[in-house]
Image (cartoon, rainbow, N blue to C red):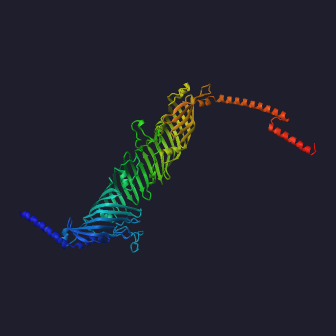
Amino acid sequence: MRILKSLFLFVIAIVLVAVAAVFVIPKEKIAQAAFAKIEDATGRKITASGDVSIRLFPVLGVSISGVEMANADWSTLGPMVSAEQLNVGVKTGPLLQKRIEVSQLELIAPKLILEIASNGTGNWVFNATAPNDAVSTANNTTQSATTTPTAVPDVTLSTVTIKNGDLRFVDHAAASDYQLSALNLTLDWPTLAADVSASLSAQFNGQPISVTLASTSPMDLINGKSATVDLSADLSGSQIKYDGTVSMAPNATGSLNADIPNIPALLSLAGLSGVALPDFIGNSAKVKTDISFSENRISLPNLSVGLTKNAISASLDIALAAKATVSGSVNIGDFDMRSVGGADQGTAGSKTSASTSTGWSTAPIDVSALGALNADIALTARSLKLDALSTQAISGRIALNDSRATVILNDVAAYDGTIKGEVILNGRKGLSSSADLRATQIAMKPLLTEMAEITKFGGRADVSLSYLSNGNSLDALIKNLSGQGAISFVQGHFDGVDMDKLMRSGDVGSGTTVFDDLNASFSIKEGVVTNKDLKLSLPNFATFGEGQINLGAQTIDYLLSPKALKARDGKGLSIPVRIKGPWSGPKIIPDLEAAVNQNLEAEKAKAEAKVKAAVEAEKKKIEDKAKKKVEKALGVEIQKGQKVEDAVKKKIEDEAKKGVLKLLGKK
């Protein structure tokens, strides 16, 4: 009972003290002390337009309405801080000894402005004078610029809290303006010499963000030196962590890790909603690198990026300007750029490529990313897979300048051969592309199968190709293609017809023609490949070819003319074969008209000469008969080699002369 009585008396005493505090606590002095502490620490004027009232819970102190903190002298955006209410907590022990020590500041619904002047000075650099090119102060005076703050006196502020605030960040140098809403912040900083920790949550561009920060040397940061920082952020579900040092210069050196499960959500946070990412990037990424940032330059010496189905390692240097410039080296490993459904599904029949039975893809090709930056990057890869092409090891360089990308292929291993040359993608006015490529000892069957689903040609070949095209889809690029090239096969084969069997029996049938070599040049216009000089050599045979391959329509119309060199007593025998129809199933049939023209060429010429001679003889007989009739009827003598009309004309002229002389009385 005595214990209960003591507890009851203790509670009564606390209540009496609390009630008395309402009347005896110097609330104006507490407010003035809090303001003085902040003004001493920042050099900024603090004002309050509302009432000051006592708070007993949860922390003893005062509540002040309508609080404002002045901005830097060079700013014209209004107060740096304005809040509906400022709650100031004080320590009870010192208060009983008539000393005021502020332990807590709480801002309710504040509006905060962080601002960078055009010369890089931040309005959070307290006690700094105005930059030379900043906006003039209210009295139109301009002070000399400096970014070195004066010494900041020590204060005691255990906790600073912001509830439901708005933060505006304005960078005059970059002409950028960002805003955070629903801002909640807790800052634990007992003294300026102590460690600091902070946690923040807010809404930015409609997406949630949260940040936690810890620093072991905040005073170094305030005084213009580097401070150790451990920063973690959750940006719309993406986890980003930085561990290193930073300074107000700004400079930073440390390690950066990012786990991004939803790239579109992160892009939306950055104001890039609706961006369609290509399949080879996917929707997720993991990034790890050391980072060094100074003087508008970022160095990423050991960057690794894990995408949804690809991985990249790089060493990059980025110069920040109106348009960033990236230099360095990138290794893309085994990089798969095939579209969804384009990857191998286990059988050839289940593979979807850029070329289908209904034509080339008409999906728009977005090349806007070419204008995002400039670059000069050395590129290597173990392999690269595209919808219509694949390679093994790659060594080359990518130069990107004002939306124009140049890919220089120093050495590309592909289809058991090598490829060298240059490819250009130009996105300045739509999409255009050009190339100058040379391939050596390429296995043609897998190449033609992947590129155009042509499976009948096999063997190794040297190929040269230069082209130019434009269009915003693969279909348009193919149909606008122009250029030229040449091809030289060694020990190849053509499936679908047996030339030897054809020459011996005249039977097309099926089978394979194996040849020693094949050479041809070609031109390309509006997606149509034209060849007139194909020559293919077989034992005891020579085959010539000419025709067209319509890349846009995916059709072929080609005449192969195999010739048995020793047939017909050395005159040779040719049985032409026409390959005509769609790539997916062309018809192969003998061309009888071409056979007649090629095999009976001498006989045809002899017959034509005989007919021509007969016609000429008959024509002469008719002309002779006509002359005799004219001579008899007109009394005209036609000389040898003289035309009938000339003889008649002379006769008329002679008679006319005689008539004129007779009229004049002359003989």
Residue at the image point whose x is 55% and y is 29% from the top: 539
Indicate the position of residue 644 as horizontal and vertical percent values.
Answer: 80, 36
Up-down relation of residue 381 to residue 615 (above or below): below
Q: Is residue 110 left or right of residue 572?
A: left
Q: Nearer the viewer, residue 516 or 209?
A: 209
Residue sticking out furthest to the left = 1
Residue at the image point whose x is 42% and y is 36% from the top: 349
- The reply to whether residue 248 is visible in this rendering is no
- The reply to whether residue 452 is visible in this rendering is yes
Indicate the position of residue 541 as horizontal and vertical percent values.
Answer: 57, 29
Q: How many marks?
A: 0
Q: Quadrant of residue 24?
A: bottom left
Q: Is residue 65 left or right of residue 251?
A: left
Q: Quadrant of residue 321?
A: bottom left
Q: Is residue 12 left or right of residue 585?
A: left
Q: Nearer the viewer, residue 644 or 593?
A: 644
Q: Nearer the viewer, residue 412 or 578?
A: 578
Q: Is residue 189 left or right of residue 591?
A: left
State the quadrant of the C terminus.
top right
State the quadrant of the N terminus.
bottom left
Q: Nearer the viewer, residue 483 or 99?
A: 483
Up-down relation of residue 136 to residue 603 (above or below): below
Indicate the position of residue 454 as horizontal and vertical percent values.
Answer: 48, 36
Indicate the position of residue 269 as horizontal and vertical percent values.
Answer: 36, 55
